[in-house]
Image (tube, grey):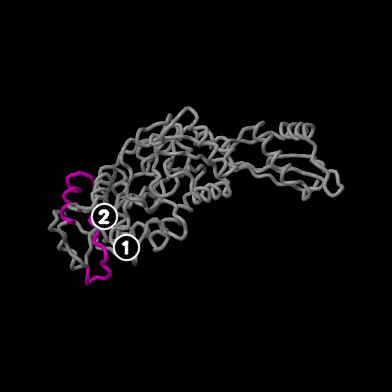
Amino acid sequence: MGMRLPVVAIVGRPNVGKSTLFNRIVGKRLAIVHEQEGITRDRMAREAEWTGHSFMLVDTGGYIPKGGDIIDKEVKKQALQAVEEADVILLMVDTRIGITAEDESIARVVLRSGKPFLVLANKADNEILDRDTGIFHRMGVKTIYPISGLNGRRIGDMLDAVVAHFDAIELENESEDAIRFAVVGMPNAGKSSLTNALLGRDQQIVTNIPGTTRDAIDTEFTYYGQRYVMVDTAGLRRRAKINDSVEYFSSLRTQQAIRSAEVVVALVDAEKGFAVQDARVMEEVIRKGKGLIVAVNKWDLVPKTDKTMKAYTQSLIDELFVLRHYPILFISTTERRRIFKVVETVKEIHAARQERIGTRALNLFLEDVQQRKQPPAVQGRELKLNYISQVRTAPPLIIIHSNHPSLIPTSYKRYLENRFRETFGFRGVPLSFQFRQK
């Protein structure tokens, strides 16, 4: 058991530099930074560290109190929730612009929260600009911290003040060994809706506008005593559709989320059906050795008979034959049907990725499969499989020694994998077989 980390949230109106500061503190370019206003729509959280103190830093979408656009309203909702969940709040304003009505509005929210907070006057790149920060006392705050998120000016002093609040924060214990899984899929397939349904709250912006989620969002939760870290990602678009830098960065983050996850849940829109890009994503997941679950969402919208599910499953396998080794679940995020079956399957696949089969059991298996079906003679040479061992887990790597490893036909390799899975399981887990000289 370990202590939960303090949560530090950066809030403020759009384009004051929240994501620039977030990236500087975590030391990586994680949040999208762009001159276009309102790029950060969802919350992004990453672990950060300062002078031996670890904490979760949360970047938020810009606070827009009177936004008429549906996404503006949801961004405001996200910022308010970040204030509610934070232990320390960083309210960011723009020194060069001065105080605005939006700044005063969010300052009232922060003051009403009763939580420790700092007002950061960003873009104060020199001592001359420091003198302009006094105007922000009008918001009812005593201390202003002039900083520059872009060049790092006085960031250290600000972080000293942040961590000074940690001793007074009561932190809960949290369990170890979180299972990390990513949720991916085409835009509007229901990725954020799945996140929200599992959490029972609006963690992310969900609208009927495709591509609302642009960054990858990490969310921790516990289900039946097991801790999970779930990553909801921007929609994977076809490359031809990635026509601006924001979409490019979002797609890149989805690839990074797949790379960092142990299990990937690939959502398919039941109404739209299986797309070429869906297949490419799943092949990428398998190629990287990650566990894979196919979750067919919006199943409540499909007219059904007692054979519909079986027929749909077969159609997916026909599109991508390797899916016969991976679980295919039919869910509805709006009606919360079978959504927790997804989590249970994630846990099962995570355990299977860690499994190691003993050498004796493996060689008894190898002897049995050859008795059932001998390797064919190739180029007049008799093939023999002499020895098998598992040399790695997560994902499993199986080494088979043979007298002529380069001559083993692909069809026989498929036979070995099929029999291996029938004997030892590993459903949902990519298996790697290597054939080496005796």
Q: Which label sits on residue 62? A: 2
Q: Residue at x 12, y 58 (%)?
A: 138
Q: Residue at x 56, y 38 (%)?
A: 326
Lateral position of residue 141 relative to residue 189, left or right: left
Q: Residue at x 55, y 35 (%)?
A: 351
Lateral position of residue 235 relative to residue 92, left or right: right
Above or below — where is 109 with respect to 95?
above
Q: Magenta stretch? A: 102-129
* Amino acid type of the residue tagged 1 in the rendering: Gly
User: What residue is disc 1 on?
Assistant: 149
Residue 102: x and y in percent read 18, 56
Using the image as rendered, state which of residue 145 and residue 251 is in the foreground: 251
SS at badge 2: loop
Whether residue 167 is visible to the viewer of this picture, yes or no, is yes
Residue furthest to the bottom: 128
Instruction: Compare marks 1 and 2 and give the one earlier in the sequence.
Output: 2
User: Residue 123 in magenta?
Assistant: yes
Label 2 environment density (alpha carbons within 10 Å; few <14, some 14–19, many ≥20): many
Label 1 environment density (alpha carbons within 10 Å; few <14, some 14–19, many ≥20): many
Using the image as rendered, state which of residue 168 and residue 61 is in the foreground: 61
User: Residue 341 in magenta?
Assistant: no
C-alpha gap between disc 1 and disc 2: 16 Å
* Amino acid type of the residue tagged 2 in the rendering: Gly
Residue 309: x and y in percent read 49, 32
Answer with the quarter of the image where residue 222 lies: top left
Q: Which label sits on residue 36? A: none
Whether residue 353 is visible to the viewer of this picture, yes or no, is no
Residue 296: x and y in percent read 45, 39
